[in-house]
Image (spheres, rainbow, N blue to C red):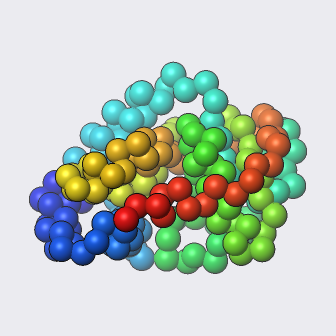
């Protein structure tokens, strides 16, 4: 989406409460049909990827049972869809994040669907791109002054998510208590 599309989405939802607006932005970013980055989004993604080259630790929140040395593959190759969300994220990538809390949030979602989950420290394999849905959601929040004031501390979570071809498990982390709901505290 180009900047004018972002502005149009923000204008369309400006009169609804912030929590509902956040949900609307998430839905706008997670359109049923994946679409490629616009030139604007590509520039932002490239800048985020360049900054991510210094990241020492990457996390992945996924199904439990993986061991050090295992390769995490896209769900389209292994036939898994733990959250049963056909319309959301494309399944041709492995999703990784710079933030353990963000990876923990994905394990919490899996737990809601009765799937045992785990956070892993991983090494990405292949080129990185910014997670399209997270990037678009972060850009919408950033461009909405009211939501930006409330969500400023969480926007890094959106800009710290990336996709790669696969990832190698280098460490299995201890399980933590569920953290789901941190973003839901927006009023």
Question: Is the N terminus in the top left, top right, bottom left or bottom right quadrant?
Answer: bottom left
Asked if residue 163 can be seen in this view, the reply is yes
Q: Residue at x 43, y 54 (%)?
A: 134
Q: How far across and how far down the image is residue 131, in percent?
A: 46, 51
Foreground: 24 or 60?
24
Q: Residue at x 80, y 36 (%)?
A: 171
Examine the rendered structure and indicate whether residue 112 appears above or below residue 174. below
Q: Is residue 160 left or right of residue 84?
A: left
Q: How far across and how far down the image is residue 6, in percent?
A: 20, 60
**Location of residue 83 by image quarter:** bottom right
Q: Residue at x 72, y 37 (%)?
A: 121
Examine the rendered structure and indicate whether residue 121 appears above or below residue 91. above
Examine the rendered structure and indicate whether residue 100 appears above or below residue 115. above
The number of callouts visible is: 0
Q: How far across and how far down the image is residue 7, in percent?
A: 15, 60
Examine the rendered structure and indicate whether residue 77 appears above or below residue 174. below
Q: Residue at x 22, y 47 (%)?
A: 40
**Location of residue 18 by image quarter:** bottom left
Foreground: 66 or 164?
66
**Location of residue 62 by image quarter:** bottom right
Q: How far across and how far down the image is residue 146, in percent?
A: 23, 56
Question: Is the C terminus in the top left, top right, bottom left or bottom right quadrant?
Answer: bottom left
Asked if residue 2 can be seen in this view, the reply is no
């Amino acid at each position: 989406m180009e900047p004018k599309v972002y502005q149009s989405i923000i204008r369309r939802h400006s009169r609804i409460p912030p929590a509902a607006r956040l949900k609307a932005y998430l839905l706008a970013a997670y359109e049923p049909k994946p679409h490629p980055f616009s030139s604007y989004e590509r520039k932002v993604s490239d800048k985020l990827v360049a900054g991510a080259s210094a990241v020492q630790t990457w996390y992945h929140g996924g199904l439990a049972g993986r061991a050090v040395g295992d390769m995490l593959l896209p769900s389209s190759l292994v036939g898994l869809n733990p959250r049963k969300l056909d319309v959301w994220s494309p399944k041709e990538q492995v999703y990784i994040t710079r933030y353990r809390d963000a990876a923990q949030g994905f394990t919490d979602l899996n737990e809601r669907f009765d799937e045992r989950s785990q956070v892993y420290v991983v090494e990405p394999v292949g080129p990185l791109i910014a997670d399209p849905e997270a990037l678009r959601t972060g850009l919408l929040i950033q461009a909405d002054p009211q939501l930006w004031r409330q969500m400023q501390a969480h926007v890094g979570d959106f800009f710290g998510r990336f996709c790669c071809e696969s990832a190698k498990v280098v460490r299995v982390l201890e399980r933590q208590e569920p953290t789901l709901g941190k973003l839901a505290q927006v009023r």
